Image (tube, rainbow, N blue to C red):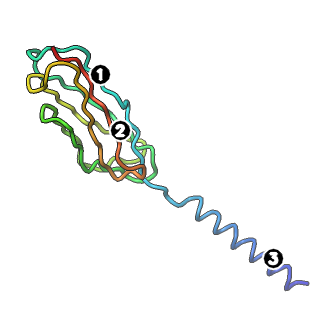
């Protein structure tokens, strides 16, 4: 009888330990952008460079690193922090668009953000009407 009770207790403790360890295992970094579309409105080619800051938050439970940001147009450049963003912390990506180098008319470009986030690459659309 004692043997059976002791065996049941040990199995229960082992199952509880496994459940606790798997529940507390880190899941990874996650990036949440402040917006997926940046609308610059109507601008002229003579207006000069347009600068926008895109903020993001690490909503995961491990540090996040933005490893690369690609733009689809030579008229758009980016600057971003190359440091670890801890869980709940915010980071910024500075986007500079030079309308003098962009074609007139409807402007739609996609920027790709590569990071250590478990969700993979994020995309941001930059749009404007250039006169």
Can you identify the residue that label 2 sits on?
Answer: 90
Mark 1–mark 3 contact, CB under 8 Å?
no
Of label 1 and label 3, which has the lower sequence position? 3
Q: As drawn, is 2 to the left or to the right of 47?
A: right
Q: Nearer the viewer, residue 11 or 109?
A: 109
Q: Secondary structure at mark 3?
A: helix
Using the rendered view, name the quadrant where residue 102 is placed. top left
Q: Nearer the viewer, residue 35 or 26?
A: 35
1 vs 2, front mark: 1
Where 130 sits versus 101, above or below? above
Q: As drawn, is 96 to the left or to the right of 38?
A: left
Of label 1 and label 2, which has the lower sequence position? 1
How far is the residue under mark 1 from the one under mark 3? 63 Å
For image coordinates 18% across by 38% down, the residue present is: 79
Of label 3 and label 2, which has the lower sequence position? 3
How far is the residue under mark 3 from the one under mark 2? 48 Å
Q: Callout 1: few (<14), some (14-19), or many (20+) C-alpha neighbours within 10 Å?
A: some
1 vs 3, front mark: 1
Using the rendered view, name the quadrant where residue 35 is placed. top left
Mark 3–mark 2 contact, CB under 8 Å?
no
Give me the disc on residue 39: 1
Horizontal and vertical percent for residue 31?
A: 39, 43
Can you identify the residue that label 3 sits on?
Answer: 8
How far is the residue under mark 1 from the one under mark 2? 22 Å
Horizontal and vertical percent for residue 104?
A: 14, 19
Where 51 sits versus 58, above or below? above
Q: Secondary structure at mark 2?
A: strand
For image coordinates 44% across by 43% down, the residue present is: 59
Question: Looking at the rendering, in which quadrant would you find the N terminus?
Answer: bottom right
Q: Callout 2: few (<14), some (14-19), or many (20+) C-alpha neighbours within 10 Å?
A: some
Give me the disc on residue 119: none
């Amino acid at each position: 009888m004692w043997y059976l009770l002791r065996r049941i207790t040990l199995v229960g403790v082992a199952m509880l330990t496994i459940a606790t360890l798997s529940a507390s295992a880190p899941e990874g970094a996650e990036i949440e952008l402040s917006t997926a579309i940046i609308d610059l409105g109507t601008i002229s080619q003579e207006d000069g460079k347009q600068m926008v800051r895109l903020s993001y938050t690490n909503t995961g439970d491990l540090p996040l690193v933005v490893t690369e940001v690609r733009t689809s147009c030579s008229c758009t450049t980016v600057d971003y922090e190359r440091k670890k963003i801890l869980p709940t912390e915010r980071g910024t990506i500075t986007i500079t668009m030079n309308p003098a180098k962009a074609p007139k008319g409807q402007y739609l470009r996609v920027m790709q953000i590569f990071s250590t986030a478990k969700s993979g690459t994020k995309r941001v659309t930059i749009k404007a009407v250039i006169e």
